[in-house]
Image (cartoon, rainbow, N blue to C red):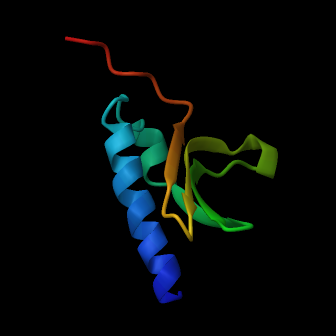
């Protein structure tokens, strides 16, 4: 993995971890099967955390974190998890 991709992955990891603080934990039955993949889209690198399914369309996406390789701007989207209730 290139040095730049390692740096972008670390930016994504920190941003994703922070975003996930607002959500309930990943269910135990998903935790052991989580996969991280990287999609290259122009100047963006998209780091997707998901649970694979039998077919590609059956995958359960947990988060998608887009990091721009030039500006280092980051955007996190979390799906398929419940927001933590305010206490």
Kindly identify the residue that appears in the image at 56 percent across and 30 percent down: 80
Task: Relative to 61, say whether 22 is above or below.
Answer: above
Find the residue positioned furthest to the front. Answer: 71
| Front in this rendered view, residue 60 or 19 | 19
Above-or-below relation of 87 to 22: above
Residue 14: x and y, percent?
A: 34, 56
Q: Residue furthest left?
A: 87
Seen from the viewer's position, the closer of residues 34 and 2 is 2
Residue 21 seen from this side: yes
Residue 76 is left or right of residue 44, and the answer is: left
Residue drawn at (45%, 59%) of the image: 12
Give above or below for 56 relative to 4: above
Residue drawn at (32%, 44%) of the image: 18
Image location (x, y in percent) of residue 61? 61, 43
Q: Quadrant of the C terminus?
A: top left
Please state the horizontal and vertical placement of residue 37, each as a whole percent of the image.
Answer: 61, 64
Q: Is residue 81 above or below residue 66?
A: above
Residue 55 in sight from this viewpoint: no
x, y percent for residue 62: 54, 42
Q: Nearer the viewer, residue 69 or 36?
A: 69
Q: Nearer the viewer, residue 20 or 43?
A: 43
């Amino acid at each position: 993995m290139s040095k730049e991709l390692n740096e972008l992955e670390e930016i994504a990891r920190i941003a994703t971890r922070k975003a996930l603080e607002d959500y309930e934990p990943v269910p135990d039955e998903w935790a052991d099967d989580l996969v991280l993949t990287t999609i290259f889209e122009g100047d963006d690198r998209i780091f997707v955390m998901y649970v694979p399914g039998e077919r590609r369309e059956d995958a359960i996406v947990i988060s998608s974190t887009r990091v721009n390789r030039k500006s280092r701007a980051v955007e996190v989207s979390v799906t398929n998890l419940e927001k933590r209730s305010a206490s």
